[in-house]
Structures are given as C-alpha cells and as structure tokens.
C-alpha cells in the first residue's frame, strides 16, 4: 500500500483539524475536521489564511510565524462559535522553503469539565464556610465570657449544634453524590415493596408535618407490584422528595403520596400544595447546589443537593423522573420504576 494513501486516510479520519499554509500564508491543504470546525464556503486551495480564519488572536500568531519565516512551535487557545480549540502551530523549514502546520483540537468538553470542577469547589467551600463562620462566631462569644450566663450558654450551644449538624449533613450528601457519580455505589437490584417503604417513610415525616401545620397522607393500592431496586436508595428518594414537599409548603397546606401501576411498572407521585416552582427554574432544580431562592432555602437548612441525589438514584434504576409545578399552587414530583419479579 502506498504511503500517500495511508497518510491521506489518516488526515481524513483524524479528530484533529489540520491546515497547511505556504510561506505566503496561502492554504495548501485542510483536512475534513478542520473544514468542519471552521466553516467557510468553497475550496480553501490558494486562499489566503485571513480569508479562512477570522479569529484575530490566531491570525496574529500565524502572521508572526510567517513574517519571521520560522519560530518555535507554540500552542494557543481560541474560542469560535461557542466552542474552544487548542491550536498547535508548527513551522517547517526545508532548503530555504517554509510552511506552517496548524493542528486544531476541540477542547470544549475539557473546558466544560474544568468549569464544573471550579464551580463545584467554589460552591462546596461557600456552603461549608457559612455554618463554620457561625460556629466560630458563637464559640468565640462564649469563650469571651458569654458562657458565664447559663441561658446564653445553652442557647449558643444549640446554635452551634445546629450548624454542626448542617455541616455533617452537607458532607454526607456530598459523599453520597460522589459515590453515585463515580458508580462506586452499585444499585442492588432486588424486589422492593414500595407499599411498605412509602408508609414507613411517610410516618417518619408526620411529626415534622404536624409541627408545621401540614396534613400528610399516603394512598397506595394493596396490590401494588414490587419494583426492582435498592431499598435504601429508593427510601432516600422518597425522603428527599417528602422533605422538599414539606419544606416548601406553608402551614395549612397538604402533602400526598400516591402510587399506582403504570407502563408495566409503578409510578409514585408526591404532591404538595406549596409555593411551586417557576417554569424557568424547573430544568435546573436537579443540578447540584441549584436553589430557586437561595436565601430562603438556606434558611430552611437546604444546600441544593437533595434533588441531584434523587436524579442519580432514579437514573441508576433506569427509571423516569417528572415534575409538574404551578407557582403559588404546588408541585408534583413523580418517578416511574420497572416492576420486578
Ligand atoms: N416541592 C417543592 N416545591 C417548591 N420548590 C421546590 C420543591 N422541591 C424542590 N424545590 C426547589 O428546588 C430547589 C432544589 O431542591 P433540592 O432538594 O435539590 O435542594 P434543597 O431542598 O434546597 O436542599 P437539600 O435538599 O440539599 O436540603 C430547592 O431549593 C427549591 O427551590
Ligand atoms: Mg431538598
């Protein structure tokens, strides 16, 4: 097989853009990946580089190489039409002649991951700093003489305890999420009786609901089929959804859990008559740390991880998750699971 055929095939199939320029800055060759990354009309043959590339930064670099007839190969990062590229520029010299090779790599995904990581660290630090600052403030006041008064001591210790509990919960939630995301937490698939799970979980929330003046009830048919899944994880889903339903419903409202057969599986609806969620926020509420009203949610002790955990668990069960909500009227969070043997 001819070397040229092999080289051409490589250039055609590779997921790196290649552009070759001559010493006058005219295009000699571009592979399909390059052409698709920098769309322009017609053939590139004979065109000047500034007719092909609009990116000012990249053009300036290329012109530098052309003017100097050489230089050290270098890398520059550019963005074009919402995508990010790394361009590796390599000058080649041969017998007084000169050309420039450009290798273009799409690094949009890496950039995204980088941003998510940065945001994540910033969010976690912020969420931990808030309760920590309170713990520090209150304990300092106590040590500065506040503890001499028994009432103050008791009150401040309670605040410290509440913030410490919150930090512990945040760390627990982060660990659960990180295990779910790295697939370290295998979903145990065994038949689970949702009937029993929902009744027990709902019972666990009765006091919290009563204290807030909210009626809570569950309506589940006796002949509900079992679903395949991990009981503890599914319980976490119901706990997180019930916690939200109560948290975001005013006194005098109600929270209802219903389950029924649907699509050869089981569908669970958790309905509240609470504040609801604006439609623009709905697509984002399953993101980590996303809260519709940050100040309000934090006041209620929330960090915005509950629904991210719910989403991961339901996805891990190959189930479906839906939300319907009307601001001022209430919300229904539903999930659908396959039924088991
Ligand atoms: N039933 C609901 N009614 C109204 N808003 C809701 C409801 N459930 C969730 N939300 C909104 O979605 C956001 C994200 O919910 P999520 O459970 O992930 O976080 P959180 O409740 O704020 O904190 P956490 O669950 O970590 O304690 C909430 O802050 C709230 O704004
Ligand atoms: Mg929550």
Image: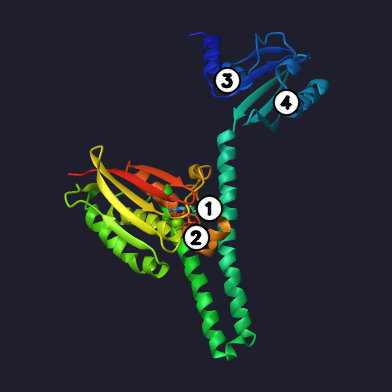
| Residue plotted at (67% across, 23% down) | 102
Q: Which of 166/151 is in front?
A: 151
Which one is earlier in the sequence, the residue at label 2 or at label 1?
Answer: 1
From this view, report whether residue 88 is shown above or below residue 268. Answer: above
Residue 252 marker: none
Q: Do tag 2 and tag 3 residues touch (Cβ < 8 Å)?
A: no
Q: Is residue 200 left or right of residue 137?
A: left
Distance from mark 4 CB to nearest ligand 1 atom below 8 Å: no
Disc 2: CA contacts within 10 A as few (<14), some (14-19) or many (>=20) = many
Q: Is mark 2 within 8 Å of ligand 1?
A: yes
Q: Where 139 sits versus 48, above or below?
A: below
Q: Quadrant of residue 86?
A: top right
- The location of residue 41, given as percent across then percent down, is 65, 12
CA separation in Å, label 2 and label 1: 8 Å
List the residue tagged with mark 3.
Answer: 33
Q: Which residue is mark 1?
A: 291
Would you name the residue on which mark 4 appears?
Answer: 55
Which numbered dot is residue 302?
2
First in sequence: mark 4 vs mark 3? 3
Q: Secondary structure at mark 2?
A: loop
């Amino acid at each position: 097989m001819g070397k040229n055929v092999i080289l051409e095939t490589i250039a055609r199939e590779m997921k790196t853009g290649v552009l070759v320029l001559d010493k006058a800055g005219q295009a000699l060759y571009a592979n399909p990946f390059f052409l698709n990354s920098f769309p322009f009309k017609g053939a590139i043959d004979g065109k000047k580089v500034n007719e092909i590339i609009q990116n000012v930064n990249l053009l300036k670099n290329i012109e530098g190489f052309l003017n100097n007839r050489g230089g050290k190969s270098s890398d520059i990062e550019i963005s074009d039409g919402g995508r990010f590229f790394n361009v590796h520029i390599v000058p080649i010299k041969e017998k007084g002649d000169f050309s420039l090779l450009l290798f273009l790599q799409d690094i949009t995904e890496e950039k995204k991951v980088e941003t998510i990581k940065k945001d994540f660290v910033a969010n976690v630090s912020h969420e931990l700093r808030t309760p920590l600052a309170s713990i520090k403030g209150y304990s300092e006041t106590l040590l500065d003489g506040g503890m001499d008064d028994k009432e103050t001591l008791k009150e401040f210790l309670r605040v410290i305890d509440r913030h410490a509990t919150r930090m512990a919960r945040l760390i627990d939630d982060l660990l659960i999420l990180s295990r779910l995301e790295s697939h370290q937490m295998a979903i145990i698939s065994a038949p689970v009786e949702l009937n029993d799970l929902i009744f027990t979980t709902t019972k666990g929330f009765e006091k919290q609901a009563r204290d807030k003046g909210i009626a809570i009830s569950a309506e589940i048919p006796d002949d509900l089929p079992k679903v395949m899944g991990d009981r503890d994880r599914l319980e976490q889903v119901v706990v997180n959804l019930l916690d939200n339903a109560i948290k975001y419903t005013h006194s005098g409202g109600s929270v209802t859990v219903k389950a029924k057969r649907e699509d050869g599986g089981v569908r669970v609806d958790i309905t509240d008559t609470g504040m609801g969620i604006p439609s623009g926020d709905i697509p984002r509420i399953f993101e980590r740390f996303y809260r519709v009203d940050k100040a309000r949610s934090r006041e209620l002790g929330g960090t915005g991880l509950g629904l991210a955990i719910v989403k991961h668990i339901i996805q891990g069960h190959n189930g479906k998750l839906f939300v319907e909500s009307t601001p001022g009227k209430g919300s229904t969070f539903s999930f659908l699971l396959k039924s088991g043997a």
